[in-house]
Image (spheres, coloured by chain):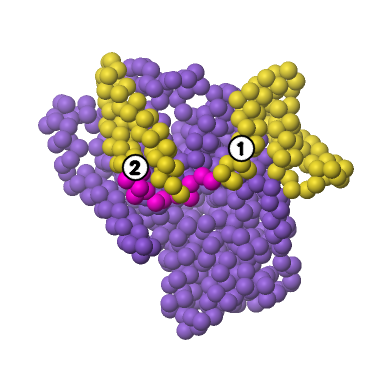
Chain colours: A purple, B yellow
């Protein structure tokens, strides 16, 4: 119960200000179609650079939580999911809104997000220290395989093509080697002055997640979408609270499936909502009502995608393996403050780890309260034309990447990587494994070097890296994750044919 | 999407992989390139696989690039590139951002260009945006941006 003694830090004026700012900003960004939670968190990282680590993480955690929930606003009122995680919410949420039940759908969405989110954060609180203790047994060879596992899991599960996902991961790992070598100070792959200090992680994160979205908005051209928001009529909150808790089957299915999916590294929230929706429909006696504006559809989908948030941080905070692309960006946020996941985090930085986790618990409550209150207002902001949104995000990306080291080189790297990623994504490459490769590359390399030195003094490299139960287990997980994804890809292709 | 569309990006990726592999295996001293050798071998193997699939017409993933899409994208991409790679440093961050924001807004705003109201709205939005950015970065975060010819 160590976490209880760190609750005070969450209630300091600066923490509360950041928590509320992050929550409200996240809700609005989440409600805006085209701006993903990952991009929102990436754009916020430069601001955290100017804050204490704990405050920076509180801001990022609040934004992560609320962007996922905020996506429900545009899913329900505009029939455009704010993020991929909200696709399932659109199915019944918008149908309810069309019938004049927009307020009810929004209240159900935020209340079920609260229940799922709180359950997910409680899992984070109780599972993380246990796994972190287990991580103590890890030596350089295990940490090397863990870094490889992080890249391969996201590379194989988060991409449409396993090979292109893994290729993206290896491109990221190569980008991480650019700059001066840590051991001997030798120059590696520096083909432009801007790369003298290596590829800055924050500039890369902003470029890889923000610029492709800006270019996607440009590519849509001069369209006037004419998206119309549905007027939100009043609905008693007490009735929504009663309804959420009376639909226990949908709420339980959503919360449990979201939590389990969040714990699986790399799977992320995109599928949590869809899996929960599908399961809730299967187990419901009112199957036929799904898709026509059934409240169970909204409850299952929204409780799942917020239940995923907390557990997706468990493998991140203990083993450096993010559960979702947004969690990968959070890992970058931790590393720039010199904080490494695992036992280091809980033994040496409990004043950072616990207030951050506790703030996510409070953040769930704030998300629900503000979400219900500002939903209709956020929907209006979500209708901001894409021309304004694209220009604003581009400017923010330029200022944000410059502000970290006050270097134009970082701005060039940000723009070049972002433009490259936009075109690569059009051909099936994926940003998430590339980012993971970039973040976990230095961890893999330092442990590979350390392991090689130990191995040279011992029984040789093969023996060191390929023997022992833990090494073999990690290698097996790497192989299984790649094999499973390859199998699924072949099956999907056969079904499509 | 045509086979050529898949071949071009996979050929570029394979070329980069070959270059990385070549440098990793030929540079001296070799110790700092031990890990890059490992990565570049994997990088090259995967890129050759992707290139082979593209050549054989087996690559199916992705939505590709269309002419209409490129026609929409090109003005924005060119303005962004000029803004980032030249104007930000030469004109100064805030001056360049103002010009870039207004230009992009004008290019992609579907409202009629002949209307005075449209231009007033665009100029007001640009002024508010730049004021917010100035307040945030110059006053709150105290970031000293390149001055250039203006500010």
Between B33 and A368, the residue placed more toward the observer is: B33
Give the Cα distance between marks 2 and 1: 28 Å
Q: Is residue B81 above or below residue A40?
A: above
Give the vertical position of A18 relative to A115 (above or below): above
- Residue under the point 34% across and 56% down: A489
Tell me: A103 left or right of B126: left
Residue B29 in the image: x percent, y percent? 28, 15
The residue that mark 1 highlights is B74
Q: Secondary structure at mark 2?
A: helix
Q: Which residues are magenta?
A: B54-66
Classify A299 as above or below A176. below
Outermost residue, left side: A459
> Circles 2 and 1: CB distance less than 8 Å?
no
Whether residue A271 appears in magenta in the rendering, the answer is no
Q: Is residue B56 magenta?
A: yes
Q: Report the residue marked by disc 2.
A: B55
Judge whether residue A20 can be spotted in this image: no
The N terminus of chain A appears in which quarter of the rendering? Answer: bottom left
């Amino acid at each position: 119960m160590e976490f209880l003694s760190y609750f005070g830090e969450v209630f300091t004026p600066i923490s509360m200000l950041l928590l509320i700012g992050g929550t409200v900003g996240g809700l609005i960004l989440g409600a805006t179609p085209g701006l993903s939670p990952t991009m929102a968190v990436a754009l916020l990282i430069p601001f955290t650079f100017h804050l204490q680590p704990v405050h920076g993480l509180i801001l990022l955690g609040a934004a992560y939580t609320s962007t996922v929930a905020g996506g429900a606003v545009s899913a329900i009122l505009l029939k455009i999911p704010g993020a991929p995680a909200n696709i399932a919410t659109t199915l019944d949420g918008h149908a309810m809104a069309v019938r004049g039940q927009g307020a009810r759908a929004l209240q159900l969405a935020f209340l079920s997000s609260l229940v799922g989110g709180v359950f997910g954060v409680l899992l984070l609180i109780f599972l993380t220290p246990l796994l972190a203790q287990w991580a103590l047994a890890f030596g350089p060879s295990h940490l090397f395989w863990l870094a490889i596992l992080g890249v391969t899991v996201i590379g194989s599960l988060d991409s449409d093509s396993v090979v292109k996902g893994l290729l993206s991961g290896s491109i990221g790992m190569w980008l991480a080697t650019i700059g001066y070598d840590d051991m001997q100070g030798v120059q590696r792959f520096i083909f432009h002055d801007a790369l003298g200090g290596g590829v800055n992680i924050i500039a890369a994160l902003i470029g890889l997640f923000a610029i492709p979205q800006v270019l996607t908005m440009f590519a849509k051209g001069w369209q006037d979408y004419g998206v119309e928001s549905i007027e939100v009529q009043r609905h008693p909150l007490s009735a929504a609270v009663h309804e959420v808790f009376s639909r226990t089957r949908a709420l339980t299915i959503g919360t449990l499936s979201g939590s389990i999916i969040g714990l699986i590294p790399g799977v992320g929230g995109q599928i949590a909502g869809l899996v929960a929706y599908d399961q809730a429909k299967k187990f419901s006696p009112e199957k036929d009502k799904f898709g026509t504006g059934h409240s169970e559809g909204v409850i299952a989908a929204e409780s799942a995608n917020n239940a995923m948030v907390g557990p997706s941080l468990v493998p991140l905070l203990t083993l450096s393996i993010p559960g979702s692309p947004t969690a990968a960006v959070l890992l970058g946020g931790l590393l720039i403050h010199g904080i490494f996941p695992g036992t280091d985090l809980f033994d040496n930085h409990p004043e950072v780890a616990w207030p951050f986790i506790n703030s996510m618990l409070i953040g769930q409550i704030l998300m629900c309260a503000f979400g219900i209150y500002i939903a209709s207002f956020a929907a209006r902001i979500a209708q901001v034309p894409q021309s304004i949104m694209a220009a604003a995000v581009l400017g923010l990306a330029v200022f944000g990447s410059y502000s970290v080291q006050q270097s134009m080189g970082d701005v060039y790297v940000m723009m070049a990587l972002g433009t490259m990623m936009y075109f690569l994504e059009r051909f099936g490459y994926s940003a998430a494994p590339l980012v993971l490769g970039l973040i976990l590359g230095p961890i893999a390399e330092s442990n590979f070097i350390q392991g090689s030195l130990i191995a040279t003094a011992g029984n040789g490299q093969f023996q060191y890296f390929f023997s022992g139960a833990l090494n073999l287990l990690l290698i097996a997980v790497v192989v299984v994750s790649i094999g499973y994804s390859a199998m699924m890809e072949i099956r999907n292709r056969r079904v499509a044919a | 999407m045509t086979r050529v569309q898949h071949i071009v990006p996979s050929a570029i990726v394979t070329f980069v992989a070959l270059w990385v592999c070549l440098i990793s295996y030929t540079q001296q001293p070799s110790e700092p390139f031990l890990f890059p050798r490992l990565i570049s071998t994997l990088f090259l193997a995967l890129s050759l696989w992707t290139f082979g699939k593209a050549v054989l017409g087996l690559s199916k993933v992705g939505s590709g690039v269309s002419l209409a899409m490129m026609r929409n994208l090109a003005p924005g991409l060119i303005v962004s590139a000029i803004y980032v790679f030249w104007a930000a440093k030469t004109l100064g961050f805030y001056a360049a951002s103002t010009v870039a924001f207004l230009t992009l807004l004008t290019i992609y705003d579907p409202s009629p260009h002949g209307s005075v109201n449209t231009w007033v709205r665009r100029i007001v939005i640009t002024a508010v945006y730049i004021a917010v950015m100035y307040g945030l970065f110059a006053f709150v975060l105290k970031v000293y941006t390149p001055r250039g010819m203006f500010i």
